[in-house]
Amino acid sequence: MSAGQDQDDDGCAEAEYESIRLAARSFCLDTLQDLETGMGDESYGDILYHASYKSARHWCEKEAFAHGLAGVELFEHYLERLSARGWGRFSLAEADFRTGTADVRLDHSTLVLSQAEACAARTCYMFAGWFAGMMDWIGENAGKPLSTICCETQCGADGFDHCIFAIRPRLLN
């Protein structure tokens, strides 16, 4: 068990404020791939985006309260936690929290590394909802409500050496 984790009575790991289930990387990746294949890229991507958006907002609420973090410090703390959980190495490339824009860099994505070769398809889009959810929560809690959207603009699966996620204000019609 890593630092900051305990075990509850049912043998499940606990990290911060909630219990977590540890699963083999191959099981997680195979499950994600099979769901994507069965549901289709677009449907699966939409479900992941909305679920990860809500998850990020919940996480921000708990971590901000537990550690007294806000703004860029909370965002970077989230990226450190994702990195520590084995998804890859996340870093904030640039950000302007006043306008709701940021670029997140992902090196060594486990989703890219699980492929034998470049596949000319973005595979790391599942992370995008997390970043928009964080940005919106941070803006709301700073008294500047935001509505952002995030998309993967560059992926290691396309042959790049890292992935980039762009968070931008949502255009209102």
Image: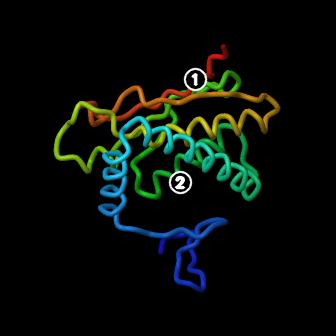
Report if the CB atoms under discs 1 and 2 are less than 8 Å apart.
no
Q: Residue 89 at x, y = what percent?
A: 41, 46
Q: Is residue 8 left or right of residue 90?
A: right
Residue 18 numbered mark, or none: none
Query: Which-is-in-front pick, marks 1 and 2?
Result: 1
Per the image, label 1 sits on a secondary structure element best described as strand
User: Real-space Cα distance between discs 1 and 2?
Assistant: 23 Å
The kind of residue on which mark 1 rests is Arg
Residue furthest bottom as drawn: 9
In the rendered image, which residue does mark 1 sit on?
168
Q: Residue 148 at x, y = what percent?
A: 62, 28
**For this rendering, which residue is in front, 52 or 79?**
52
Q: Residue at x 34, y 61 (%)?
A: 25
Q: How many marks?
A: 2
Q: Earlier in the sequence, mark 1 or mark 2?
A: 2
Q: Tell me: residue 4, above or below residue 145.
A: below
Residue 81 numbered mark, or none: 2
Q: Residue 122 at x, y = what percent?
A: 33, 34
Q: Is residue 3 left or right of residue 89?
A: right
The image quarter in which residue 23 lies = bottom left
Residue furthest right as drawn: 143
**For this rendering, which residue is in front, 75 or 49?**
49
Residue furthest left as drawn: 117
Q: Tell me: residue 1, above or below residue 131.
A: below
Q: Tell me: residue 42, above or below residue 10.
A: above
Q: Residue at x 61, y 42 (%)?
A: 75
Q: Residue at x 57, y 77 (%)?
A: 6
The image quarter in which residue 70 lies = top right
